[in-house]
Image (tube, rainbow, N blue to C red):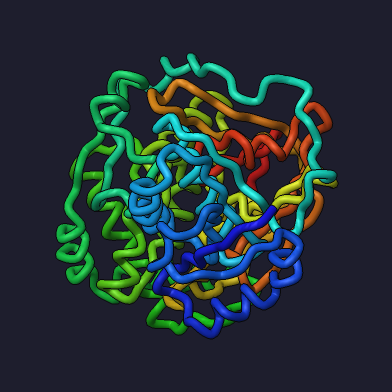
Amino acid sequence: MNGSFIAVASDFITQTKINDIIRINAEFLKELKCTQISSSAIQEIEQLYYFVITGGTERQILDLHAKRNAAFHDEDIVLLTHASHNSLPAALEVLARFQQDGKQGRIIYLPETAEDIKPNPIPAIKKFEDKQTLSGKKIGLIGPPSDWLVASTPKHELVKKAFGVEIVQIDLEEVKHLYKKIEIEQVEDISEELTGNSQEIREPSSKEIEDNVRVYLTIKKLISKYKLDALTIRCFDLVLDMKTTGCFALSRLNDERIIAGCEGDIVSTTGMMWALHKYGRIPWMANPSQVNLKENSLILAHCTVPCSLVKSYRLRSHFESGLGVGIQGEFPLKDVRIFRLGGKNLDLIWQAKGKILQNHHAENLCRTQIKVKLDDEYSIQDLLTNPLGNHLVTLMNEEYRN
């Protein structure tokens, strides 16, 4: 394999850190005979790879490939990923979008090799038809979906047709307006409960914790006003505009069995609603952040785990921004079901069963991290060859409530 790569990273990471990631993976890039070029040379190289340095880069890759496509029409897209900074989740989302558009592509996960691939003995993607439980439900979409969700932003009419779910659009300005009206007296009891039950408070200040509770109380008002059954919020705008995060709010709402999804991801939020109604258990939405093809395992990570699902939790900062509150939970080592809805017409599902082997605590991933080994009849390779998108939904095979 000879070629060149373009490094694609979000604004949340420094150039020094980008260079460090490239250096750490230099040996594997050398084995691929792959050298770095700048994006200005995108139409000059015969074989090109997109090295996905961080999450939040999906739109950038689409834009780069549009420029590339003018000179190299209909070539296969190859995405290089690595084990940190939400590289793999971004690649899964963008490859799902390319495949929705009828393009071919693949993901190379460094340092895995072709010898590590475990073939799947059963069909990976199946038709999804069990949708009747959601008819008449309402999902609040607070702000537009995050820009990087290039495979997870179906038209509202399609969601209505496929699931009978109504999408209620809510402006983020309404969140900001209501947020300012929440008085300190309203947040004190919940803040004390949150901190009192935590095993440790590492980065967040008292004010950051109180601000997260304000976000929760603000969203509760919107749920009541619009009579919502579920919601998803463009949460990174809270970071950029309000210097706070929605991680606790989403965690707490899911504990209350009000489905709450991250990043304006309508597809995953719909999947979480379906899981709650189908199995009666609270789901967790997470990034598939690392894979091990030899072990047939993956690491799932996110900052919004429902506290009732974990044995204990710490209060950390939000991973990408270092601001606000992220929840670092310790899961019990139990059997789980993992799935993802998707497809151009929202009529496909990938699902697998497995067991949580251990909790991880890496500083270069979202705060709650679990390693799951899939049962033998399922294959992690499916995620690299035919993904339906980034976020996966995980739930216990048996009810667990802390």
* Residue at the image point whose x is 17% and y is 53% from the top: 171
Q: Is residue 191 left or right of residue 50?
A: left
Task: State whether residue 67 is above or below residue 185.
Answer: above
Q: Is residue 327 visible?
A: no
Q: Is residue 388 left or right of residue 148?
A: right
Task: State whether residue 60 is above or below residue 288.
Answer: below
Picture coordinates of residue 188, whole percent (x, y):
38, 73
* Residue at the image point whose x is 35% and y is 20% from the top: 162
In the image shown, does 211 or 83 lie closer to the viewer? 83
Picture coordinates of residue 314, whole percent (x, y):
61, 70
Picture coordinates of residue 119, whole percent (x, y):
78, 31
Q: How many marks?
A: 0
In the image shown, does 85 or 267 lie closer to the viewer? 85
Q: Is residue 302 visible?
A: yes
* Residue at the image point whose x is 32% and y is 54% from the top: 147
Give the quarter of the image for residue 134.
Answer: top left
Picture coordinates of residue 235, whole percent (x, y):
35, 59
* Residue at the image point whose x is 25% and y is 72% from the top: 241
In the image shown, does 194 or 147 lie closer to the viewer? 147
